[in-house]
Image (cartoon, helix red, strand yellow):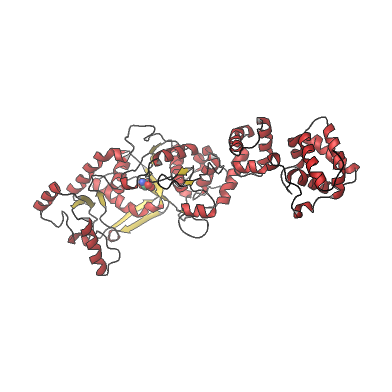
Amino acid sequence: MVLRFAPSPTGPLHIGGVRTALYNYLLARQQGGRFILRIEDTDQTRFVPGAEAYIIQSLSWCGITFDEGPHVGGPNGPYRQSERKDIYAQYAHQLVEQGWAYYAFDTEEELEEMRQRFEAAGMVSPQYNSITRTYMKNSLTLPLQEVQERLRTQPYVIRFLMPRGREVRFYDEIRGWVSFHTKELDDKVLLKSDGMPTYHLANVVDDHLMGITHVVRGEEWLPSTPLHVLLYEGFGWEMPKFAHLPLILRPDGGGKLSKRDGDRLGFPVFPLWWQDPSSGEVSLGYRERGFLPEGLVNYLALLGWHPSGEQEVFTMEELIAAFDLSRVSKAGARFDYEKARWINQQHLRRRSVADLVPQVRVLWEARELPPISDTQLEALIQLARERASTLPEIVDAVRFFYAPPTHPLPETLSAKLHSPVLALLPTFLLELEQVSEHTEPIVETTLKGWARTHSLPLGKVLLTLRLLLTGEESGPSLYAILVLLGAAEVRRRLQIALPVYGVSQRL
Ligand code: GLU
């Protein structure tokens, strides 16, 4: 089994592209096959600098690796179509010789004139096809001598000669039998006047030369497949198997998920940070939003593929074992950011705390928070990760640690402070300072014992103390908060807070 991912470097890789690469990768690894990266950069007008490096970097972050490609080499190179230019012309001319293609000499103005003429005659979006070609300047309509003269002196393109009156049928591994009639298809350009191939020619020639056995790609390429099938026929080559993946739909309403939807609804559509080289606009990716690569990969795997059992959380190894093209749906897959977050949370919980320390430290330092030891950071991560779906949410969840509240609290919160607790808190502080060891169980026993001694309802004690120390009504366990802050910091915060609420006793 030989598979390929064949992106065009026309911009940053969208998560839909990551999913296509992922499905190909899973199949290749599952079947012990090979996986090739091929850069389809024949359309020089759409080339974006940095896009190829971005694609490689993004996939590598996701853990998607290639056996062959421009970055790793291999026996089927070069892997950039722009470096294979000479290969394609020869195949295009072969098709002309065999009667599957022809030369066309029409200028842009002539093409435009044809469109206008046929539109005026009532044709909807006229194309260069089996009807219109007979009115144009090409090797089918011009005398042989003139053709030869023009070939020597003029720019020309090679067009595919779409046969008349044929039904083209092919089997799609996801959709079953698909059929198109050639009257719906036009005479696509195969070789451009600058000698560069178009996508169709280069794609088919390379899939053949690279020995691709399975073409797994997005649904948007389905309408191009009948042309590809005919090209295989024209060349007399064996066809690969085809599978067209469902579109990724926007979360609200129909239509393909675009960057605009992500901006509008507040989620990334790129794996990594990207700066548009022409506008300078910066888009954050899943990595910057605090996703783990395995979280994103797991979510994308489920976007269109339905595992046979109940399991939803998969490592890459598990995905490789479980993935199955026959369980990929035909219908578009609706993007669900909340689900992506949930899946990421499951992976956050699976990581060891020590493993997360360096990543959280980067965020900690980026926010210029006070210096913190690895042990403290580990304790904070342990505490916060049950509540966090992404890495920055871990830092948000321990705000209490680095951002003491300002007193008085807003009226809605200060109304919840219990006066008897406020009045007696100085005595708790003394007890806290005397405990032998600052561990959660010991601090818990101390606080509960103190509340009992003074007949204070525990719920009110916990809420009052939490509000004074953190300014928030809910959050991680208060006992853990007391341990993490330490008695000295608890004293400092109470010294500031209590007088604000009228407790004048000196601490
Ligand atoms: N270059 C095409 C793209 O950018 C590849 C389509 C295919 O896989 O055949 O998506």
Q: Is residue 116 left or right of residue 272?
A: left
User: Residue 474 at what x, y percent from top left?
Assistant: 73, 48
Q: Nearer the viewer, residue 258 or 103?
A: 258
Quadrant of the image containing the C terminus: top right
Classify 155 as above or below 439.
Answer: below
Q: Is residue 260 left or right of residue 490?
A: left
Quadrant of the image containing the N terminus: top left
User: Residue 172 at what x, y percent from top left?
Assistant: 39, 51
Q: Is residue 241 visible?
A: no
Quarter of the image where one finds residue 428: top right
User: Residue 387 at what x, y percent from top left?
Assistant: 66, 44
Q: Nearer the viewer, residue 138 or 94?
A: 138
Classify 328 as above or below 62.
Answer: below
Residue under the image location 78 percent in, 42 percent down: 496
Q: Nearer the viewer, residue 83 or 495?
A: 495
**Number of marks in picture:** 0
